[in-house]
Amino acid sequence: MLKESVLYTLKKILPAGQVFTDRASLIAYEVDAGLDRGLPEGVVFPRTTDEVMNVMRWASTHGVPLIARGAGTGLSGGAVADRGGIIVEFAHMNRLNELDPLGRSAIVEPALINLRLDERAQTMGLYFPPDPSSQRASTMGGNVAENSGGPHCFKYGVTTNYVIGMNVVLGTGERIRAGGLALDYPEYDFCGLITGSEGMLGLITSMSLRLLRRPPAVKTLLAIFDSVEQAGTAVSAVIASGLMPATMEMMDQRIVRIIEPFAHANLPLDAGAVLIIEFDGYPEGLDRQLEEVVHILQTHGGKDMRIARDEEERYKIWLARKSAAGAIAREAPAQYTVDITVPRSRLAEMLAEANRIGDEFDLRMGHVFHAGDGNLHPLILVSDPDDQDLINRIHAGGREMARCCVAMGGSITGEHGVGIEKRDFMPLMHKPEEMLAMWDVKQVFDPQFLLNPGKVFPTPAPGETGPYAGYVPLEQLVPATAELSPQGYTPTTAEEAARQLQALSQAGRAVTITSAPLSKQSKTGPAQISTSALRGVRAYAPEDLYITVGAGTPLSEIQAFLRERGQHIPLVSPWPDMSIGALVATNLNAPLRMRYGAVRDVVLCATVALADGRVIRTGRPIVKNVAGFDLTKVFVGSHGTLGLLTDISLKVFALPRTQKTLLFPVEDLSSGLLWGQEMLQLALTASAIALTQDGAQPPEISSPYLLTYTAEGVPEDVQAELAQVTEVLQRFNAPAPLTTETMTGTALWTSSIQKAGQQALVVRIGVPVKNLAIYLEGVAQLLQDTSYIVDFASGFVYVTRAVESAEAVSTWLDALRQMALTLHGYAIVLAQPATLVGQLERWGYQPSSLEVMRRLKTQWDPQHILNPAAFVLD
């Protein structure tokens, strides 16, 4: 219990009326939307980042836990003070600080309501896709802390796919900016790591978010099945067809009979399962897609299908789906929602298991779930919240369901988080060395363990000294060290790589990671470790839309394998022999990202060998998984400085049914920039919007610049979008475009970098999209003797230049860099001739999180042997 004198000092650092310690106020904060309880010792209401920093420093001085809280809609006890301390209630930090239609981005404070953001975005024709069922009340800070999902995640992804930057106050009292409005800053992806960390790594005071163009049309289909098994098979068939619905939601008979009397959505009470499938896009393409999906559903037992006639009927259908909790309140005073995820191909099997478990523990429940991404929500009715035997049976049943999910390759939580509810389930899913890796991260960000203590990590057993149940000293986890090899290493397994790295670490010898076969070793320089033997397809699950490959596998080899099966991964490299491990480690993104997401969005999980000999798996090959910290993100773009990637699981996509490109000749830079910005406002199916100045135009075009717009997807959508683009540009007096199916914006990007050759310098400049035209006009003189390509959606400029002398290039690069930094961007060297290595500053950028980056590297690579001088921290 905090002394009154300590609480008095807290009241002194904030204005009057922002600190509450009376019991009446505290009781309101002892519970969130779950069953767990914990009474805090105070509640503070900061209004600014500075006030948050003051509270954090006060907590650090006095050793007081802090628990961040938004609207209290969490279901896992994540905002409950089960170990006392102070609730940091962000209710007053609820502003929408910026909404940028050109850059398709927003800057928000943590207490802004999810639905309010989407409503404001709608007024500008934009869309924020993550839409948890609680979006009418849940805050953006809570959504980010829990990496919330929702019905639209199958097509659009979860919250982490839309968070590009944040300001965070760490447990040390430091304030850092992770990411920002430009993309792919040269730094560890702490933005991705903190998202989903349940308030245990920092207090988020603002977030930069990515937005999309709002689809101009949407249609909702309701289909009835005799059983959930039938419906699950139908869902798999829809996915196998290559169609991409916006949502695929399912309800079983038990829950329908509870919901329908409440929602009056005309749901049949005798249905074994009800499936909601929604398509969005252009009106021209929806009817054809619905016609095709109706045929697929009928083939697999679907019947009584109806398409919502208007927005009112569509609203009723979704009201029914999102009103499950409200409907249950008519049947019981409380309910408990289980949140588990399996590969979507195991849905029917898991539903049967969940029902078996419910019967075994005598639980009354029904199911609502996100069929498209395998995320199940058994809803258990709690007839008497004070019946301890019932509560015990609920928790035992939930644990057994979680165990079954893990056995099927799934997760103990898909979107609700671990919190208090599932902290003791974590060893079901994670090995001790993986839990230790998460604990390492916790120590880096919050060394006094003040932020949201008691969450995620299991409760230690009696007499245990470790931070979680099942703790094993590291020296017992790591096998005996390998002998040092003067020839270097070519490991064939992750375990072998870990032993080799441990031997090098103990000898204090630096190591360079390469995907090429080993070259002759220097006796004094860094050793080499090659991933060339970590090659090939390890697992391929077309029905679950993922592939697992060895990190040394060339990207071209993976694409060839998938192309034969009508699929692809949306990643591209200008260097033909580049391995998938190298591409992930360098975070190399092509213009194609605007359609499919960045490398960080395509990588689902990885196996990593750490320098101290541990082997960790960073997640699962499923879309929804929030069981612990998202370690995958921090390895993407880490340039091999944190660990050695040994295998990687990636999302796969159906090859687009149609792909077409418009080529516009452009006579001057200003026109090209104006037209490109106008194009960006129309992008829905676009996979590249690029302006090239490199003489690579086709014979039919002889202008100095070439503006490219590539769209891909179903034919009707592509045709509608290209027609819109052509019409809009005609208003700006653009010439008629050339249409091609053989050239794409991404292919032009690839050839532009390739043709520079090994003797040219390749620089990538990244600025916020809204500043792209300002930047290019400001450096036009510097780019006169170069070739370059502009990626409008990413805010990137790729410049290639012939090299005269290191001094001249350095002066030129500094000038490019200074302008970029002024506009909140950066300029980095992607490739350089051997003659310049060591003479140019590659990065020219210092992240505000640099010291935290160094601490994390030291935690996982204490001797700093991995890829020395390969990244900004050296």
Image (spheres, rainbow, N blue to C red):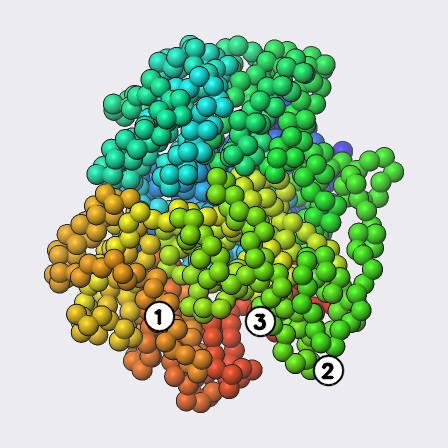
State the quadrant of the N terminus.
Answer: top right
- The disc placed on residue 47 is none
Q: Earlier in the sequence, mark 1 or mark 2?
A: 2
Residue drawn 62% across the image and 61% down it:
534
Does residue 387 sit above or below 608 in this rendering? above
The residue indicated by pointer 3 is 516
Q: Earlier in the sequence, mark 2 or mark 3?
A: 3
- Residue to which mark 2 is pinned: 523
For numbered disc 2, what is the local secondary structure? Answer: loop
Q: In the rendered view, does 635 fall on the left or right side of 613? A: left
The part of the image, by quadrant, that contains residue 676 is bottom left
Choose mark 1 or mark 3, whichever is in front: 3
Q: For the residue marked with disc 2, what is the amino acid? A: Lys
Q: Disc 3 residue type? A: Ala
User: Residue 516's spot in the image, x, y percent?
Assistant: 58, 71
How busy is the neighbourhood of tag 3: few (under 14 within 10 Å), some, or many (20 plus)?
some
Give the numbered dot on residue 751.
1
Residue 165 seen in this snapshot: no
Gap between marks 1 and 3 measured at Cα: 23 Å
Q: Is mark 1 in CB contact (under 8 Å) with mark 2?
A: no
